[in-house]
Image: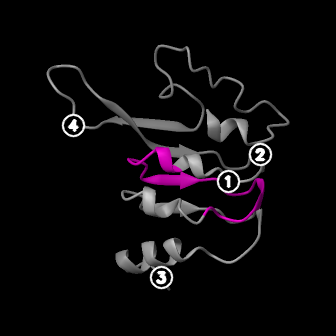
């Protein structure tokens, strides 16, 4: 929810993000979850693995609180109006991230070293 609070959402695309919902956050728009396999006993532990919010006209900064989703594999925030720098600590906190889409925003500043190291370790820098 801290990620959402940092954004302006002029069309209410994220208005259904209700933390009191029994299935939250897995039933929220743009969120995909998966069993983590690390739960104890018979209770399934479900984790967020994808956050896909393209073309929603969201604006504001990218919150470093996205790093609170360590199981995230795909992050798509493309084609919004996000601004400011990419948080430097974000990618060191997302060890499972495989797909990142930030194009067509108004981001500024240098690419964080953690982002460059993140992709060079995986061999994806071209």
- Residue at (47, 82) in percent of width and height: 125
Badge 1 local density, few (<14 within 10 Å), some, or many (20+)? Answer: many
Q: Give how far apart the Cα atoms at labels 2 and 1 are.
A: 10 Å
Q: Position of residue 79 (x, y in %)?
A: 73, 57
Q: Give how far apart the Cα atoms at labels 4 and 3 are.
A: 31 Å
User: Which numbered mark, 4 or 1, is in the foreground of this view?
Assistant: 1
Residue placed under numbered mark 1 in the picture = 62
Residue placed under numbered mark 3 in the picture = 125
Q: Which mark is residue 58?
A: 2
- Report whether 30 appears left or right of 105: left
Q: Give how far apart the Cα atoms at labels 1 and 3 are.
A: 22 Å
Q: Position of residue 81 (x, y in %)?
A: 80, 55
Query: Is residue 94 shown above or below 13?
Result: below
Foreground: 84 or 97?
A: 84
Task: Compare marks 4 and 1 and give the one earlier in the sequence.
Answer: 4
Residue found at the far right of this picture: 10
Residue placed under numbered mark 4 in the picture = 37
Badge 2 local density, few (<14 within 10 Å), some, or many (20+)? Answer: many
Q: Is residue 100 magenta?
A: no
Task: Compare marks 4 and 3 and give the one earlier in the sequence.
Answer: 4
Span highlighted in magenta in the image:
67-87
Quarter of the figure with the N terminus = top right
Foreground: 121 or 65?
A: 65
Q: Give how far apart the Cα atoms at labels 3 and 2 are.
A: 27 Å
- Residue at (46, 44) in percent of width and height: 69
Q: Quadrant of residue 30?
A: top right
């Amino acid at each position: 929810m801290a990620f959402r609070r940092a954004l302006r959402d002029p069309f209410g695309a994220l208005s259904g993000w209700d933390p009191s919902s029994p299935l939250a956050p897995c039933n929220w728009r743009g969120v995909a979850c998966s069993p983590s396999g690390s739960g104890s006993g018979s209770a399934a532990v479900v984790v967020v693995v994808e956050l896909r919010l393209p073309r929603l006209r969201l604006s504001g900064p990218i919150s470093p609180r996205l790093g609170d989703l360590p199981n995230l594999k795909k992050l798509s925030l493309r084609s919004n109006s996000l601004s400011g720098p990419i948080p430097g600590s974000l990618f060191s906190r997302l060890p499972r991230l495989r797909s990142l889409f930030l194009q067509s925003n108004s981001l500024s500043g240098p690419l964080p070293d953690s982002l460059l190291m993140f992709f060079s370790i995986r061999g994806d820098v071209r």
